[in-house]
Image: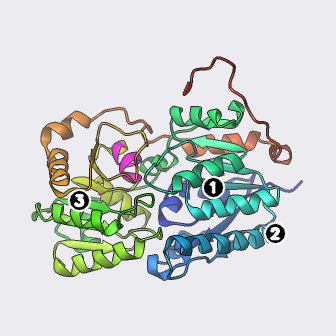
Amino acid sequence: MSRPRICVTTGTRADYGLLYWLMRDLENDPDFDLQIAVSAMHLAPAFGETVRFIRADGFQIDAEIACLDDDDSDAGMARAFIRAVDGFLAAFERLKPDFLVILGDRFEALAAATAATFLHVPIGHIHGGEVTLGAMDDTFRHAVTKMAHLHFTAAAPYARRVIQMGEAPERVFNIGAIGLDNFRRLSIPSRVELSHDLGIDPGRDYLLVTYHPATMDSASPLAGLEQLIEAVRHFPNLALIITKANSDPGGRKINARLEAFQSEQPDRVRLVASLGQLRYLAAMTHAAAVLGNSSSGLIEAPAVDVPTVNVGSRQLGRLKAMSVIDTVEQTDAIVAAIEKALSSPFRNAIKNSSPPYGRPGDATGAVLSALRRADFSVLVRKPFYDLPLGTPEGA
């Protein structure tokens, strides 16, 4: 009897970092055959062509779905979605996976789920049930949840929300944040090693900065970025390690402005399209604080007791640890939030707290355990689960 073919999709540097150990364990597991389908930002030179990191890690890539062009307007991203659906459809027709693994909420995740649905391929969805009201990804995430057949959530409230959406409780597994496995299983470079690699003074404190477009906001993403840039000018003694924005509408404009900012302060700013998994985790672990609007500031940073200044609306609705400081996109407010994050009383208060997404554990093992028990031949037929009568909303 042939082994089940488990296809893992990845479109960005971020989701690959979270999926790494699941991919590695599937590759080494005698019960499964791993397939890898790579798309979107991984294949775009403008965003670092991060497929190179996957190849460098020794993985065999079974399908490449190029879908991005130079148009990152709303309509341009819609056309990229259409190309992605077509590419995934062709890939899945050829690879014939028995099960598809999708993480998160981006347009290429929805494209993969759409193609799989037409081909009757059951789907496992990681990080469902979450809310990010500031980004259109919020809608994509919930759509993937309704297409999926197994659900691996990062916190108990998210598991309840997936069930509230009609998914059967026995198909929902609350495993915690899968990316936290990296802190337990990887050897994180030291501060000295990271500083030498990036060419910064190892004795100089720094902020780790990532700012993505808030795609549900009507204002230009450059408006909020300018407020953030003005805020960091108030802290000239801090170096800045900045990772570029993603391919969302407006991302290229943000990156062009960040390149100009780097040219203004080349001794202080290190701007990279992608740090890669190890360097990013090292940069987070040793940072004075994380600044911007990336989900990693809410999920990974609290697990290693690093303060986060969460700017603007992009992550509105997510569970937040006590180490996360929310602020509006105004210079004075961002400055005050950074000062709080850097203060000794705040840093001492967050140590040994209980982040909502947990501490490093074995989320990957929990996924593998569920896959071993699954009958992929019958998963594609799923019931709609109705909450018992009288169940309070949100229970």
Amino acid type, callout 2? Glu
Residue at position x 61%, y 40% from top? 366
Residue that badge 2 annotates = 93
User: From mark 3 to mark 1, how far is it between C-alphas?
Assistant: 31 Å
With respect to residue 217, does 69 lie above or below?
Answer: below
Say left or right for 394 vs 167: left
Q: Which residues are magenta?
A: 295-302
**Residue placed furthest toward the front:** 218
**Which residue matches tag 3?**
207
Instruction: Please state, as top left, top right, bottom left or bottom right, where the C terminus lies in the image.
Output: top right
Determine whether, in the image, residue 5 is placed left or right of residue 16: right
Query: Picture coordinates of residue 26 (x, y %)?
Result: 66, 55
Q: Name the residue type under label 3.
A: Leu
Q: Is residue 60 left or right of residue 47?
A: right
Q: Residue 157 in the image: x percent, y percent?
A: 51, 32
Q: Secondary structure at mark 2?
A: helix
Identify the residue at image location x=61%, y=42%: 152
Residue 10 is a magenta residue: no
The residue at 86%/47% (across/down) is 377
Q: Secondary structure at mark 3?
A: strand
Task: State yes or no: discs 2 and 1 in contact (Cβ < 8 Å).
Answer: no
Instruction: Identify residue for label 1.
Output: 102
What residue is drawn where x is 68% and y is 46%?
A: 146
**Which residue occupies the foreground of this view, 77 or 7?**
77
Majority secondary structure of the magenta segment? helix
